[in-house]
Image: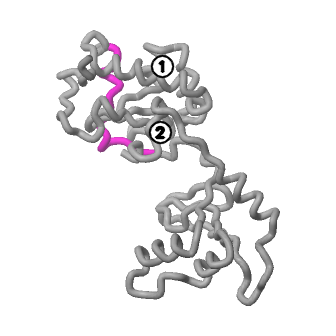
Amino acid sequence: MAAARACDWLAVPAHHPFGLATLPYGSFSSAHHPAQRRVGVAIGDRVLDLTTAAQRLLPGRAADFSSGSLDAFLAAGDGAWAQVRAAVTNWLSEDHYRDAIEDLLVPAADIALHLPFTVADYVDFYASEQHATNIGRIFRPESEPLTPTGGTCRSGITAGPGRWWSPAPRSGGRVVRPGRPGRRHRATARAPGSTSRPNSASWSAFLACSENRFRPASSPSMFSASAW
């Protein structure tokens, strides 16, 4: 069975990164309504206002997008994800939906993007001395690869809450935008000269935060593609 293709009137180039096979989600506002956040789907160089499109064409799922955030949609589960994905694909690949959605397509250059969902927590680990050494060589090619913190991997796993090199660092359990001040958390590691293991309660908290499950193939593509 041939894959669906975007309607000709959308003028999406064949190899555009945001074609019908991608359809990443995000949260945006327009210059005309900067305080009104909506959920959108990128298609070519435009963004479909999914908040309004669902009200018109998929009212049973409209509540998932009414806040302008993806929180409710993520909580709805893979059945909802598959349903919405199929619906959006139909709207963008079948000409008879043109009248219903054409006015909901906004040039991507004219929108402002917002954090699309509430960030819970995540943890980075150096799993071994070799792991820490390889990372150190990548980030500090002209200096000693193991820092004092990385050296603790010789005696155990080193963990830290969030990627310290992330463009959107965590600050007190939230994500802040680049350029804004944020408090950096300290990694769990032994103090210099200490022979004790890190506090077991801290390890339990880190391990609890780090538990993730792989999402099914129908899951929304946000974490990579939806940066638009």
- State the SS at label 1: helix
Give the residue at the far top of this rendering. Answer: 96
In the rendered image, residue 107 lying in the magenta stretch gets the answer yes
Location of the N terminus (image quadrant): top left
Q: Residues within 10 Å of mark 2 (few under 14, many from 20)?
A: many
In which quadrant of the rendered view does residue 189 lie? bottom right
Left or right for 24, reference 199: left
Q: Secondary structure at mark 2?
A: strand
Task: In the rendered structure, find residue 191 and report the number of the disc placed on it.
Answer: none
Residue drawn at 55 percent across, 63 percent down: 163
The residue that mark 2 highlights is 27
Q: Residue 67: horizontal and vertical position, in percent? A: 57, 31
- Disc 1: CA contacts within 10 A as few (<14), some (14-19) or many (>=20): few
- Horizontal side, residue 222 vs residue 189: left or right: left
Across and down, in percent, residue 98 comes to: 28, 16
Q: Tell me: residue 1, above or below residue 221.
A: above
Please name the residue shown 43% across and 87% down the image: 143
Q: CA distance from mark 1 to mark 2?
A: 19 Å
Please determine whether, in this image, residue 69 is positioned above or below residue 94.
below
Q: Which residues are magenta?
A: 100-113
x then y, percent, for residue 83: 48, 19
Q: List the residue tagged with mark 1.
A: 83
Q: Nearer the viewer, residue 100 or 159?
A: 159
Q: Amino acid at mark 1?
A: Gln
Q: Residue 71: image x %, image y %?
A: 59, 35
Q: How many marks?
A: 2
